[in-house]
Each structure stands twice: as C-alpha cells, then as structure tokens.
Image: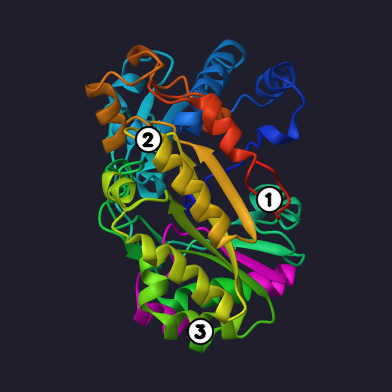
Amino acid sequence: MVGTYARKAGFDIDIFDLRDLNSWDEFARTMEKEQFDVVGISISYVDYKVALQAIDIIKKVSPKSIIVAGGFVANLFCQVLLDNSAIDYVIKGEGEKSFTALLRLIEHGMTAPKLVESIRPDLDELPYIDRTMFNYERETTCMFGPRQRYPHVTMLAGRGCPYQCGYCQPAESKTYGKMRIRSVDNVIRELEELYDKYKFRSVTFWDDTFTFNKKWVMEFCDKWKWDADIAITCRADIASNNEDMMRRLSEIGVQWVCIGFETGTQRMLDFISKGVKLEQNYKSAEICRKYGMKVMGTNMLGLPTETKEDSIATIEMIKRIDAEHLQLFYFTPIPGTYLYDYCIKNDLMIRKVEDAFDIERSDCYTKNIKGIDYEFLDGLKTQVKYKGFYKL
C-alpha cells in the first residue's frame, strides 16, 4: 500500500521480494545493479535481523541509496532505528502519506528530520493496492485455509483491533490507533477489480477481527455477489453472541472461520485479557459447524503462570473443539506487549533484554520463558489430531 500510494503520486516504485532470490549474494548483486535512490523497509520484530542484514548490504553496494525504515519496530521502538547510522529516516505510524511526502522532499533536494511522524490516512481515500508491483499471480496459489479454491486473493477491510489481548497489545493500538474500517462499497469495488483481473474463487480477509462491526458485516453480506470461498477471522464471543450474523456469513460463502481460542481455562483467558468466557469458545465452534463453516483454531501453550493443569485443560479444549485446521504454538513474548512487560518484571525471559529483537518466526515452536516444562508440553502436543495441511 505504501508503494501504491507513492506510485500514484508519480514516483517510479518497485516492490523488491526476497523470495525471488536464492541468496544474499544475489541480493547484493541486484542492489548493486539497480542503485535505487530510496529503499523503504518495513521492519517487524521477526524480520528485524533480516532487515539489518539487508540494510548493511545495501549500504556497501549502493552507498548513495537512502534508507527509510518503518513498521512495528519503528512505531514502538523508533529510538533503536534512530540510533542506527545506516538508516537515514524513520517513519513512525502509517506510512502511505508520510513516505510519499518524504520522497517529495528528497526529490527536490530538501531534507527532513530523521524521525518522520505519520500522516494518518482516511482508508476510503487510499488507492487499491497495485498488485502488479510484484508477482501476484504466485500469490493467487497461496491458500490460507485447506481446500480453498484457486485462484485465491487476499484483502484487508480495515486496520487495528479494539481488544486488549495481552500478547499483542498495546503494540497494535500504538501503531494504528482506534480501529478503522473501510466502507462496504469501497471494499466491494476493490473486489470487483480483483475479480475482473484474477477471476478469484476464494478470498481471505486478513483483518484481525473481520466481524467486529455487525452492521458493517450484514451490509457486506447483502452486497457480496461472487461464487467464492471466504475465510475470515472472528472472536469466540462475537460468534457466540451473534448467531444470526454467522448464519448470514455462511450463506454468502464463508468456508473458514479463524478463531483464537488460545487457552483452556477461564483463569488463563482472564490472565491474558482475552475478554472471552471459556464456554464461548465451545459455543462459537458449535455455531460455525451448525451453518457448515469450518473452524481454524489458534491455541497457545506455555503462557506465564500456566500450570500443568492449565496445559492439560487447553489440550482437552482442543480435542473437544476438534478444529478442522489446528494451529498450536508456544507463547512467545513480543516487545511492546503487556505480557512481554510481565515477563520482564517477573524475570521470566530466557532471551536477554538486550536481545529483545532477536526473534525468529520459528520461535513459536521453541522454549521462550522460564518456569515452563516444555518437555511435558511436547508430550501433551502428541495427543492432538491435525486435520489441515500442516502439522505445527
């Protein structure tokens, strides 16, 4: 979206996809050949080390390239990036308007403070993502849920999340502010363009909580007009309290509902500030099955204060819900979240504080905090049946 907005403003923009390369040497050769004027890099926690490696290479082979950093790390720990002399600018907040305004200054030989504050956009005023900037045909083969039909496209209807789950807040709220959602008509028009171009047969909405606004959802259902499988995310309390909305979603083709059940006791649900009752976990799954929708359940083991009895209860919940696609992770404390602060305060971190960003995507399968019997948890996980494509 950042690239799309800048391209619409007249700048020559490319999306550089590391998946197209075989090695860092190839990355270096490509960067040396292209000599980009500006390179913008969105940095999340799990990509921090990769981003720094990319920046180091760019500065060596294309020293005149201006490096602009954004993303979650820039929003929550901007000083870490400001202190990095290889980074020229840091954009804090949403980047579409801010990055483009910065490019205008650079284009005219002007400078700006190293820290560039966000200009928050109205979502309906943003252009639709220009998917021609990278190999989107490949993306149409990447399915979110098992047995989704090809071609497949992905969408975002809004930004942010109003809930206060301790494993991801307040990091997200500090980035996006109050949750915002595009108008239904705006989303439908983008879908029309995507259908004209890709003739999609399945759609995944990556919104954290697609079903947050019931009125919006019901209007969306009334205006949906394609024969396609739909995958959405939903909270257990929303699904269990709005059966009529879930039924309507099933009628337009929602095939997969991803629900974060997380943990199997009320004490632990309250500890992580999930805002959900345990019985709602079970009821939400029942409602989805009642109307022919499949459940993709996400769950965590190894949370702070979790006892063996809590862990066993989580496994029993998983077996009882029996999701059609299961995702089972070990809790990973993420900087900027309430639970990360709890782990620091209570000396639960295995990773040193100075290594806060030394996080890998695979850490959700490894030991992350003290006081957890991971060997016991490894044994518990063998009791679970996996129905989807992946055994996690």
Residue 117 seen in the current view: yes
- Screen quadrant of the C terminus: top right
The residue type indicated by label 2 comes to Thr
Q: What residue sits right under mark 2 in the picture?
A: 307
Per the model, the C-alpha gap separating discs 1 and 2 is: 24 Å
Q: Is residue 55 left or right of residue 213?
A: right
Q: What residue sits right under mark 3 in the picture?
A: 247
10 Å crowding of disc 3: few (<14), some (14-19), many (20+): some
Q: Nearer the viewer, residue 178 or 327?
A: 327
Q: Earlier in the sequence, mark 1 or mark 3?
A: 3
Q: Is residue 328 left or right of residue 132?
A: left
| Coordinates of residue 346 in the picture (x, y in percent) | 24, 22
Q: Of the numbered discs in the image, which one, if any, rests on residue 386?
A: 1
Q: Nearer the viewer, mark 2 or mark 3?
A: 2
The residue type indicated by label 1 comes to Tyr
| Coordinates of residue 150 in the picture (x, y in percent) | 77, 65
Q: Residue sitting at 58 percent across and 86 percent down?
A: 251
Task: Report helix, strand or loop for mark 1.
Answer: loop
Task: Report helix, strand or loop for mark 2.
Answer: loop
Per the model, the C-alpha gap separating discs 1 and 3 is: 26 Å
Is residue 3 rendered magenta in the image?
no
The residue type indicated by label 3 comes to Arg
Q: Residue sitting at 54 percent across and 14 percent down?
A: 56
Tell me if residue 233 comes above or below residue 245 in the rendering: above
| Coordinates of residue 330 in the picture (x, y in percent) | 50, 35
